[in-house]
Amino acid sequence: MAINPKKHEMPAQDPKVRAHNFEEVALGYEEAVALAEAERCLNCKNQPCVSGCPVNVHIPEFIMKVKEGDFEGAYQIISETSSLPAVCGRVCPQETQCEEVCSLGIKFEPVGIGRLERFVADWHNEQEALKANPPKSNGHKVAIVGSGPAGLTCAGDLAKKGYAVTVYEALHTAGGVLVYGIPEFRLPKAIVAREVQGLKDLGVEVVTNAVIGRTLTIDELFDMGFEAVFVGSGAGLPSFMNIPGESLTGVYSANEYLTRSNLMKAYEDNPNTPIMKGGKVAVVGGGNVAMDAARTALRLGAEKVYVVYRRSMEELPARAEEVEHAQEEGIEFNLLCNPVEILGYENPDDPRDPKNGTVRAIRCIKMELGEADESGRRRPVAIEGSEFDLDVDAVIMSIGTSPNPLIKDTTEGLEVNRRGGIIVDEGGLTSRNAVYAGGDAVTGAATVISAMGAGKVAAASIDEYLSAK
């Protein structure tokens, strides 16, 4: 049978409709489409896709089960190495990982591995599946700091081996960046809640509203009987440009903006937290978080949303799919330009004017690309005298984040690098005995799947350490 050269399209909401709701954009494969896509897999002997996956999902094996119509069998294969299959099937950048090295992709489009993973996970979650039975206890206790993808993965892998695992989460809902950072239209919160519940069924305890470094310290966790601690606290400290006007009302970090919308439901009619709705919005940055913020602003009623990015479309770091969705929804990309100032309303004759101190425009300068920098991308250079203003009512800064220094500042002997990332060895061990770390707390902001990979590595190291005690 001839191989279809193109992967089957992912059905999605119409752009004109989805731009005004928070329902999931991608609708998922139907069973017949999933079966047809699975037939495209060559079941290669060397399996390059497995090595391209940070958590080493046995991809050909699960796709073979899909071909056979054994969707539960496919789910069980994925679950051997991944604690969050429904999440990964939605937000993992497969195009630069498993699908990038797919053998079929040498001649045709690669197999839609992520789309098949999502189909399998969703199929499993729609069944009345029996709850997982916690394995027999091995008598050891491990604490996990942070319930994001790194922490949840580490917790899941250890729980399957019989460890008593307690996850401490600073916010009131478990999931970390999966719930506060990624919008509902990309990752429904019910999906995250179901994945977390699956870990609880394995025996994992989740404690919310627990700020490690304030509520408890790392040393106090050891005093409570925990024999090892994994720090997966993420990178939630936002960066700013330090340009004039960043203190004006109407300037947000992307983290704040998305947390207010995603976790605190500021999109509701009478929200418990305020957020800018309507008007014109500029989002500064070009990553996935910038796309999330821009598309969220549109759904909150913005009449116009601009993405302001200092390089060209070729250097834009966001996933191509997210950029395409943003363009389809009407978001305007202002490329090769960079903010130099945020302008506010001033009426010195009437200090009671409610617009005083609020955003009225963002001043940008045009850029051109020069020589490559240390990242390999061409360095943007300002064009003198090319300043222009964009009239906006809000500015969202999405230029990166770094690890919060709280754990470092309250944990003696924990070494960090100049960016605030915790220093670890190849097994995730920090400079403190029995303290491990991984994910964004080590690397700075990165992908969900890379954080999961770090959680797996640390779990294996913890198991090796405690098994030898």
Image (cartoon, rainbow, N blue to C red):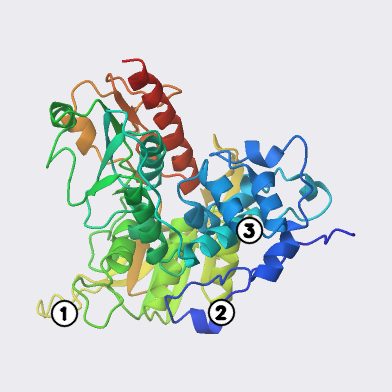
- Quarter holding the C terminus is top left
Residue closest to the eye, 232 or 322? 232
Residue extending farthest right: 1
Distance from disc 3 to disc 2, alpha carbons, whole Å, reads: 23 Å
Q: Quadrant of residue 142?
A: top left
Q: Quadrant of residue 455?
A: top left
Q: CA distance from mark 1 to mark 3?
A: 52 Å
Q: Nearer the viewer, mark 3 or mark 2?
A: 3
Q: Residue at x 36, y 63 (%)?
A: 396
Circle 1: element type: loop
Q: Earlier in the sequence, mark 1 or mark 3?
A: 3
Residue 88: x and y in percent read: 51, 53
- Residue that badge 1 annotates: 354
- Name the residue beneath numbered marker 3: 116
Location of residue 293 with respect to 162 vertically, above or below: below
Could you tell me the amino acid type at mark 3? Answer: Leu
Say which amino acid is labelled 1.
Answer: Pro
Local crowd size for mark 3, using a 10 Å CA cut-off: few (<14), some (14–19), many (≥20): many
Say which residue appears at 71% left-offset and 57% top-offset: 68
Q: CA distance from mark 1 to mark 2?
A: 36 Å
The residue that mark 2 highlights is: 15
In the structure shown, which secondary structural element does the residue marked by tag 2 occupy?
A: helix
Left or right of 130 on screen, residue 176 = left
